Amino acid sequence: MMLNKLFKHVWFWLYGGGHIDPTAFGQGRDAYKAGRGENPYPPLTYKHYSWKRGYDESLVQDPSNSW
């Protein structure tokens, strides 16, 4: 259980941090909520990038986009 939380924290800290949050799991929580569409202005996440098509701005502009 603790290892799972740690993995999620590291994953979202590396790929989901769009802003600074002083809480330990804040970045992961915010990135996860944004991915589920609960945040109307999601932070930049790893899904906006692709090694095939590069950076896609339409994903940043569209608040209804979700994982």
Image (cartoon, grey):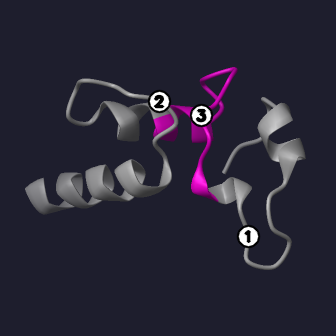
- Residue drawn at 36 percent across, 49 percent down: 13
Cα distance between the residues tagged 1 and 3: 17 Å
Does the magenta portion include 35?
yes
Pick the residue in front: 17 or 33. 17
Residue 20 — which label? none
Secondary structure of residue under mark 3:
loop
Q: Identify residue for label 3.
A: 43
Pick the residue in front: 9 or 2. 9
Left or right: where 11 falls relative to 1: right
Three-letter code, disc 1:
Ser
Residue 67 vertical position relative to residue 23 in the rendered view, above or below: below
- Residue drawn at 38 percent across, 41 percent down: 28
Residue 19 — which label? 2
Cα distance between the residues tagged 1 and 2: 21 Å
Task: Kindly indicate the quadrant of the structure image that contains residue 23.
Answer: top left
| Range shown magenta | 31-46
Q: Position of residue 56 (x, y in %)?
A: 84, 54
Q: Residue furthest right?
A: 58
Q: Are marks 2 and 3 in contact (CB under 8 Å)?
A: yes
Three-letter code, disc 3:
Pro
Q: Residue furthest bottom?
A: 52
Task: Kindly indicate the quadrant of the structure image that contains residue 3.
Answer: bottom left
Q: Identify residue for label 1.
A: 50
